[in-house]
Image (cartoon, grey):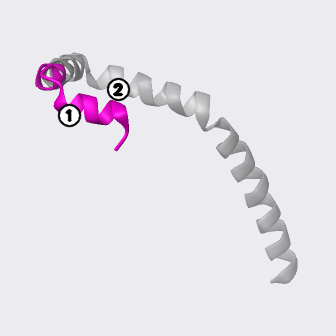
Amino acid sequence: MPLCKKHLQNSSLNEDMLNSIESVIDSRLNELTPELVKEIVQTLIKEHLDWLVVWGGVFGGLIGLVSSFLL
């Protein structure tokens, strides 16, 4: 068992730490509005999935071109 994990399990602060983290997460989740969630998802898509759209278009076009010759 890793030393850090063993230390956390035996620590008296473990329960306090978990409660503190839980309260921070709960407060942040309570701050979320549908508009904020929409902005977060749009930003994520824009930053990380642009390449997927581009390559999906390229490969989709190639597959369509090849299938038009075969059919």
> Which span is picked out in magenta?
1-17
Mark 2: few, some, or many residues within 10 Å (few <14, many ≥20)?
few
Q: Position of residue 68 (x, y in %)?
A: 82, 74
Q: In percent of the image, x 26 and y 21: which residue is there?
A: 33
Q: Is residue 25 magenta?
A: no
Q: Quadrant of the N terminus?
A: top left
Look at the image and tell me in which quarter the C terminus lies. Answer: bottom right
Q: Nearer the viewer, mark 2 or mark 1?
A: 1
Q: Position of residue 4 (x, y in %)?
A: 34, 30
Examine the residues drawn in magenta and state their main secondary structure. Answer: helix
Q: Quadrant of residue 63?
A: bottom right
Outermost right residue: 69
User: Pointer 2 and pointer 1: residues touching (CB < 8 Å)?
Assistant: no
Residue type at mark 2 is Val
Residue 13, placed above or below residue 57: above
| Picture quadrant where residue 24 is located | top left
Residue marked by disc 1: 9
Query: Which of the two labelled residues, at mark 2 and mark 1, occupies the earlier sequence position?
Result: 1
The residue sitting at 74% across, 48% down in the picture is 55
Residue wearing tag 2:
37
Could you classify mark 1 by the number of other residues whose Cα lies within 10 Å: few (under 14), some (14-19), or many (20 or more)?
few
SS for dot 2: helix
Q: Nearer the viewer, residue 22 or 57?
A: 22
For the point 82% across and 62% down, the residue is 62
Viewer-side residue, 64 vs 40? 40
Q: Position of residue 22 (x, y in %)?
A: 17, 24
Q: Is residue 64 above or below residue 1?
A: below
